[in-house]
Amino acid sequence: DEIDTIGKSRDASKFGGGNDEREQTLNQLLAELDGFDPGKGVIVLGATNRPEVLDKALLRPGRFDRRITVDRPNLAGRLATLQVHTRNIKLAEDVNLEKIAQATAGCVGADLANLVNEAALRAVRKGRRAVNQDDLLVSFELVIAGSEKKGTIITEEEKRIIAYHEVGHALVAAKQKNAQPVSKITIVPHTQGALGYTLHLPEEEKFLMSKEDILAEIRTLLAGRSSEEVVCNTMTSGAANDIERATEMARNLVARFGMCDEFDMMALGSVQSQYLDGGYSMTCAQETYAAADRETIKILRQCHEEAKQILRENRELLDKIAAYLLKKETITGQEMMAIIEGRDPETVDNYGASKSSQPAFRPSVPETIEAPAKHINIVSEPVPMPDFDEKPEEKKPEDTPEPPTDSPAEDKPE
């Protein structure tokens, strides 16, 4: 494991020639690899998150000449992982693992195991013998955003600003055809630094983003600050992470994706340590770098103004949704869509929102959680959709111990 520790590329400018201990270790490793008898069937495996730093001699044929990428599981992989981890857990009739698998795009196996464990603990704390769908959904949010900090004291004015901030994100997303649907809005503080957040869950996994998709995401990110300006006539530090993410996306649009008229198809940098999210390093001249900054600012300014314009045109809806959020503290995307469509949100009990019934709406960009103090981005990947129509029911072991409880079993979500 971590073979880059001893297999890092040799560089005469950094190491002290043949006397360097690291280089001697690498030379000995290469000699040992060449000494195996091919007839004995010995297979040598090495793992690393930084394949780009490995020495070229280590990757020659006969040594580590086959690369196997272990990536994050796709939809089918996440579903299979969830089925494994829920094998010995009693599930309520309302549990839909396909929806949980779709919501957890970007999660690895350890994340899913933690999610199922948290759901089981929540069911026990609630005095139920079975894990229901609400347990799994709440546990998903617990894994990515932390638990609720109900003891945090927030002034009424701050709560009002946070509510308009989050509703700004959600409303601008709902009014754009390239934005993804809103699943939940909350102004309850969480342990991972968020004073509130807006959760977006896509209706399908996508891996290509058009220029319109990126611009729609930037408008959504900047809509929180825009809402503060339009309604409260002020600016707060809560938009810091939103601005950081929007700037990154605008810079990628200019420097990486070739979507800027100023630079056409010119790449201005390169990705560093792609498996470790090392970011994008600019390799262009200083004058070009400055011009790219100007284009980035131009895109951000335009998206900022467009977000404010959307909020001004829908000020009445903004006020209604914010008032409802202040009353309930946490609302679902379906409740928000009910207000937008003129229906009574109190009659809605579905978790999540769907834009499929409205021709103007299209899900697009990867899942994103936006919050005044916290932003989490999860990237989806292309997957073949599994066939869920004829899913066999898994048999539960009869001798599986059930969680202790002091109250009757309940299968309904809390």
Image (spheres, grey):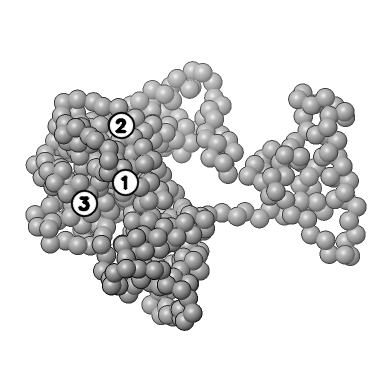
Q: Nearer the viewer, residue 159 or 320?
A: 159
Residue 273, quarter of picture:
top right
Please report the residue visible at 84 percent of the width from the left and 45 percent of the height from the top: 29
x then y, percent, for residue 42: 83, 61
Q: Secondary structure at mark 3?
A: strand
For label 2, the crowd category at 10 Å Cα-Cα, with few meaning under 14, some 14 to 19 and many 20 or more, is many
Cβ–Cβ below 8 Å for labels 2 and 1? no
Report the residue at 52% width, 35% height from top. 279
Q: Residue 16 location, x and y as percent?
A: 82, 24
First reached walking from the N terminus: tag 2 or tag 3: 2
The residue furthest top is: 287
The answer to whether 294 appears left or right of 40 in the picture is left
Answer left or right for 321 relative to 396.
left
Residue flagged by tag 3: what amino acid is it? Ile
Residue under the point 77% across and 23% down: 13
Give the label on residue 331, or none. Answer: 3
Q: Position of residue 124 (x, y in %)?
A: 36, 64
Tell me: 214 left or right of 67.
left
Residue at label 2? Answer: 239
Could you tell me the amino acid type at mark 1? Glu
Give the alpha-carbon distance from disc 1 to disc 3, as whole Å.
15 Å
- Of labels 2 and 1, earlier in sequence is 1
In the picture, the quarter occupied by the C terminus is bottom left
Residue 99, visible in the rendered structure: no
Nearer the observer, 332 or 216: 332
Mark 1 lies on residue:
148
Q: Identify which amino acid the numbered label 2 is placed on.
A: Ala
Residue closer to the observer: 41 or 207: 41
Distance CA(mark 2)–CA(mark 3)? 21 Å
Residue 10, x across and y down, in percent: 78, 33
